[in-house]
Image: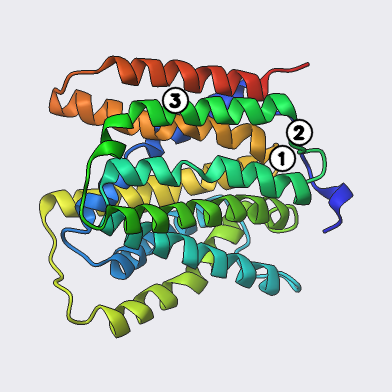
Amino acid sequence: MKKSEIANEQPTPKVILLVLLLALLWGGNSVSIKISLQDLPPLALAGFRFLLGLAAITIWSLSRGIRIRLNPGEMLPLMALTVIFLLQIITLNVGTGFTTAARSAIFISTYPFFTALFANFWVPGDRLFIRKTVGICVAFGGVLLTFADNLQLAIDGALVGDLIVMTSGALLGLRVVVTKRVVQSIHPYRLLIWLMIFSLPCFFGLSFLLERDAAFHLSISGTAAILYQGLVIAGFCFVAWTSVLEKYSPSKLVVLFFLTPLAGVLLSKLLLGDEIYLTLIGGAVLVACGIYLVNRRD
């Protein structure tokens, strides 16, 4: 794929609304991972999550008559993307196990910085400039403001977990940009199906080798959390996000995902009846300002 052939359109209002919906749905991901880890170890959890996602995407693709069989030349880029994908998911699950869901949500939210950095070099027309950089920093400042109390808490092993999750954030930023390039020549649904087909033996194989002594059981809450991760996140959200990346600027869209941790906090507070603090409102305002700066048209 030549650089000049990479589509990099400005997102339309409809696309921005769709990505905002995805950001809201992804808001429950760290919480659902934390709940699921009470029932399953990290690698097995990833395997079951993407097994459900694979089933959902395959059924949807077949119902729309989309060809699943790989074309010549598609294997190598998919294998490279699979390696990044495996490392990103494993570090996210393992890191979340060492820290809290709230802290995990903060540090995985660093990935728009990495996405913008990688896109600056590998996606033509998606350059970093002052307003975009300031907008990303303002939005992340909103996330930090919202979670300020959580960052001050002293939790055993949290620093290790935080660093592992931040590594996952860097890998996720890289994954977004590589997906942007690969999806130019491979249908988004076929890309996701084969990404999961290549990944599943690795997740389950590593789980068999490393987690055979771990406790496996399923509670009602754990099952619901796995279904959410598999069908909503790995199914609907992955398909929609990969399809959007096919045409639109990644660095302008990923800043919308700074709403994800805020949405997670808001949903948990609403569901649990907790008070909504001023830090959440202030954080939301900063995130909104950052999104506006990044996506404002000159």
Circles 2 and 1: CB atoms closer than 8 Å: yes
* For residue 58, above or below residue 143: below
* 250 left or right of 104 in image: right
Q: Residue at x 71, y 40 (%)?
A: 247
Q: Position of residue 85 (x, y in %)?
A: 52, 63
Question: Amino acid type of disc 3?
Answer: Gly
- Give neighbour class at mark 3: few <14, some 14-19, many 20+ (Cα, 10 Å): many
Q: Give the residue at mark 1.
A: 247
Residues at marks 3 and 1, CA–CA distance in whole angstroms: 28 Å
The residue that appears at 35% across and 29% down in the rendered structure is: 263
- Judging by the rendered image, the residue that carries numbered circle 3 is 142
Q: Is residue 276 left or right of residue 179?
A: left
x and y percent of residue 203 in the render? 39, 73
Q: Nearer the viewer, residue 76 or 275?
A: 275
Amino acid at pointer 1: Lys
Viewport quadrant of the C terminus = top right
Mark 3 or mark 2, which is nearer the start of the sequence? 2
The answer to whether residue 20 is seen in the rendering is no
Position in image of residue 52 (x %, y %): 36, 59
In front: 265, or 166? 166
Dot 1 falls on a residue whose secondary structure is loop
- 200 to 97, vertically: above or below: below
Q: CA distance from mark 2 to mark 3?
A: 27 Å
The nearer-to-camera label among 3 and 1 is 3
Residue density around tag 1, few if under 14, some if 14–19, many if 20 or more, within 10 Å: some
- Return the disc, 3 or 1, that comes first in the chain's sequence: 3
* Kind of element beneath mark 2: loop
Q: Which residue is mark 2?
A: 9
